[in-house]
Image: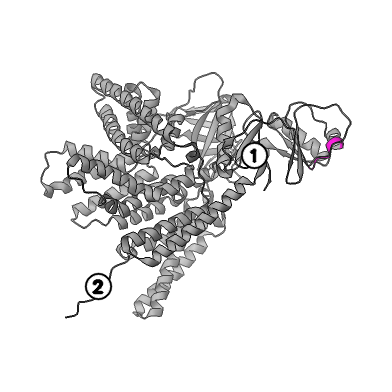
Amino acid sequence: MKRWPLHNAYFWEKAPFFRILLPFVAGIIFYEYAGFGALKAGVSLSVIGIAFLCFAAIIAAKKSNGLYKVVLFSLLNIMLFFSGHLVSYYNDIRNSKTWFGSAENIGKPCLARINDMPAEKEHSWKVPVTMLCYVNDGKVNPVSGNAFLYLYKDGEPMMLHKGDSIWAPGKWQPIKNAGNPFEFDYPGYCRQNNLFYQQSCSINDIRLYASGDPAGMPLIERSHDWSMAQLDKYITDPKTKGLIQAMLLGDEVNLDEDLRQSYSETGIVHIIAISGGNVAIFFFVISALLWWLKDRRHLWVKYAIALPLVWFYVIMAGAAPSAIRAAIMFSLLAFAVMLQKNNNSLNQLFATAFLLLCAQPMWLFSAGFQLSFVAVLSLILFYTPVYKWLSPTKKITRLLWGAVAASIAAEMLVSPLVIYYFHNFPLLFLIANVAAYLFMSIVLVLGIAIIVLSFIPAVAKALGICTVSLVTVFDKIVGWLQSCNPESFHFLSLSTQELVMIYAAITGIVLFLLKKQKPALFMGLGVLCVLLLSFCKDEWKRLHQERLVVYNVGKANHIELINGDTYSIVCTDTGAAKKTAYAVKPAHTKWGAWKKDTNTTNEIFYICGKTALLLSQDINTSQQFPVDYLIINYTGSQDAVKLKQLFAPKLVILGTQYSQKQQNRIVNDFAAAGINVHAIGRDGAFVLSGL
């Protein structure tokens, strides 16, 4: 007797939200890269409306042949594509009529509210503000939007607090980078978070309008601030306090940057962010408090009680993308348990991503959102196959192997993305992740206990001491793990095309191993061959490169000569080593020139047929020496006519030793003499390159 043919469903049939998510994401990407204002909301609404009417007409006509199915599928994707564009349009504050950054509002003093604690920087205080209104001709005009105020330090303590209302001058400037090669796109990051302007001014330029009333703040904000105060009170070590506040409450205002860097280099920086691990531990604490509900039939009661508490905690902790993702997935799991439905983790993940992007479409470009989504996807796909590699019998070994299997499964898809964004691969990620999960579990429980038991000072203080001791021990472990990583693993680089090829190769090889699909194996191996050719091409370029780079670091120039895979320092400011390292590391990584050669004292450089002269002092000579580029590396008055007669430069590179006012004057003088000027402080770093 013949068996009824069985159809193995494709994963997009098991997870239908995948097909909804793809065109929706495409619409968001189109909005981001097509340019601001390329397509108005009215156009998207019209297309969606027409497509919906056509879709409804075909459904009503009950047409079911192949052509109509294709048309229906196309119409549905068109609606989703333009829906993605539409939510992106309305999420962009620049499309609001009340945005303070519009041409008619930008230069006017505004009443603003401080929306977070001022963060201390090296020379200033960073104050995030929300615009409320401005006054024009005696009329109050409401405005909206967020910005950053940088208040110069004047030796006095910061007297402004979260919730205060202040009058800020209208001297707003667009947020911009220093212009160094391959540096983090901070303006793009701010743009995706609806932040476009910043302002640096003295505290004397600010007028306090009204002090914030803590009692008048929403319950969630008061709960957050109260919890922060308890941790601040009972955890005395600043580094530990900043770490626990970030891990438990999502507030990184006190987080030590060196600690963040060490966690990043060992591959455990994810434990700092509020994510699924926090929600799982929070649910574990709630379940422990409901220990008397032992019957599995009452499991739904635990989820019903935990659900609103989880959401309250996530919103109180800042509602980061990873936290919201975890909360939505927990909610879907809770509803499945309460309704006694099967749990489809893959479809839940795609549904969660869709809901998140409906609310905040620009989260699509957030590294945190991508890493969180990819990590969970990797766990769903690979945890069970990896766990089956071994069959431990004892409970402790099963738990330990489960943690190791989870770490391996997550790294399979997360590692390429980590290399792409952070240019780092932790060699001992297995040890680091297992230790980090154990550490995170204990520390989060201790943090919760400190907050809950803060009404018993002796107990809370003892818990704080235990927390400091635990963090101190763990920091030593992290330091050892960090020292075990080869230096070259901190300077890894992948292009976008290479990242796509890596994921294509992983897909092909995994399909062959799990589904025995030979075409997938050939595809994966073929992509790997192309990837290796791409790496060879990159290496050839590195070994044959020659560059002279003048970085935008601070008040003194940092100039490097790059030859092949090494760099030599021409001149630098030894007092700004940390700032210099931040500026040059992205270039060293991308160009593959992270090995330091001996410093050079050359003043004349020949690169790609061009001549560059480094002028470090004023000269008293009449001998002419024509050059293509003249780098001014000293302070003092500049005689544009004389320099033109002596060197006839095509371009003058002006260092950062001069103030903004002096730079403008010198630029104007050289322009009058017919010489173009590249001012490092204004135009960013200068790169003279040749291959």
State the image coordinates of residue 325 (x, y, percent, origin top left): 35, 48
The correct choice, above or below, for 324 with respect to 658 in the image is below
Q: How is the image coloured?
A: one colour
State the image coordinates of residue 184 (x, y, percent, origin top left): 54, 42
Residue 334 visible within the image: yes
499 or 239, nearer to the observer:
499
The residue at the point 57 percent across, 27 percent down is: 577
The correct choice, above or below, for 468 with respect to 494 in the image is above
**Disc 1 on helix, strand or loop?**
strand
Query: For mark 1, what is the residue?
Result: 562
Asked if labels 2 and 1 touch by Cβ distance under 8 angstroms, the answer is no
Q: Magenta stretch?
A: 645-650
Which of label 1 and label 2 is nearer to you?
Answer: 1
State the image coordinates of residue 23 (x, y, percent, origin top left): 43, 62
Rate crowding at label 1 as few (under 14), some (14 to 19) or many (20 or more) other CA atoms within 10 Å. Answer: many
Rate crowding at label 2 as few (under 14), some (14 to 19) or many (20 or more) other CA atoms within 10 Å. Answer: few
Q: Is residue 395 magenta?
A: no
The residue at the point 20 percent across, 77 percent down is: 3
Query: For mark 2, what is the residue?
Result: 6
